[in-house]
Image (tube, grey):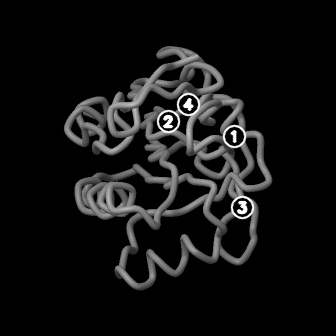
Amino acid sequence: MATVTLKGNPITTLADLPAIGSKAPDFTLTGAGLADVKLADFAGKRLVLNIFPSVDTPTCATSVRKFNQVLSSLTNTAVLNISADLPFAQARFCGAEGLENVLSGSSFRSTFGKDYGVVFATGPLTGLLSRAVVVLDEQGKVIYTEQVAETANEPSYEAAVAALN
C-alpha cells in the first residue's frame, strides 16, 4: 500500500507499484471503439503507462499533453494513458486536443488498478486510479516507476524519458 496526498490530505492505494526488474502484470483495458487494449499488443515496444484519476482534471489533462509532446520523437515507444474514464471521454479529449501520439485505455471493467496497485483505497477518489508512471522495456520488464506523492502534481516526465535512454 502506498500513501500519497490529495491537496495535502493523506490517502492510500491498495498496494505498491510493480517492482523495477519484474515482469509487468498482464492487463486488458478498454480502448477506443470499446476494443480490448492488451499488454501483448505492445510486444517488442517500449511502453510508458501514464496512469491518472481522470482526464477531466487539469493535471491529468496536462500529463496526457506533455507525454504526447515529449515522447512523440522517440522510436519504438508507445504511451498508454490509463484512467477509469469511459473510453468515450478519453477519445473525446484526445480528439479535441489533436493528440495523435498517445493511446488510451479505460480500467472501468478491468483489474488493472488492483494488479498495478494504483486504485485509491481511501479518500474522496476511492475507486479511481492514483497518479503514477510505469515504464516497460521491449520485453515487458518494469524499468521505471513513479507513484506521484501529491495527486495534484505532475509526474516527472524527464525521469520517465531518462529511463528509456
Q: Residues within 10 Å of mark 1 (few under 14, many from 20)?
A: many
Vertical position of residue 49 compared to residue 81: above or below: above
Could you give the CA–CA distance between mark 2 and mark 3, rounded to whole angstroms? 22 Å
**Viewer-closest of 62 and 79:** 62
Could you give the CA–CA distance between mark 2 and mark 4, rounded to whole angstroms?
4 Å
Which residue lies under the disc numbered 4?
139
What's under tag 3, amino acid-wise? Thr
In the displayed structure, 33 sits above or below 26; it is below
Circle 1 — which element?
A: helix
Select label 2 or label 1 by which is in front. Answer: 1
> Is there CB contact under 8 Å for labels 2 and 4?
yes
Q: Is residue 158 above or below residue 15?
A: below
Q: Looking at the image, is mark 2 or mark 3 earlier in the sequence? A: 3
Compute the Cα span from label 4 to label 3: 22 Å
- The dot on residue 9 is none
Looking at numbered disc 4 in the image, what kind of residue is underneath it?
Gln
Give me the residue at 54% from left, 70% from top.
Answer: 90
Q: Within 10 angstroms of label 3, few (less than 14), some, or many (20 or more) residues? A: many
Residue bearing the label numbered 2:
138
2 and 1 marks in contact (CB < 8 Å): no
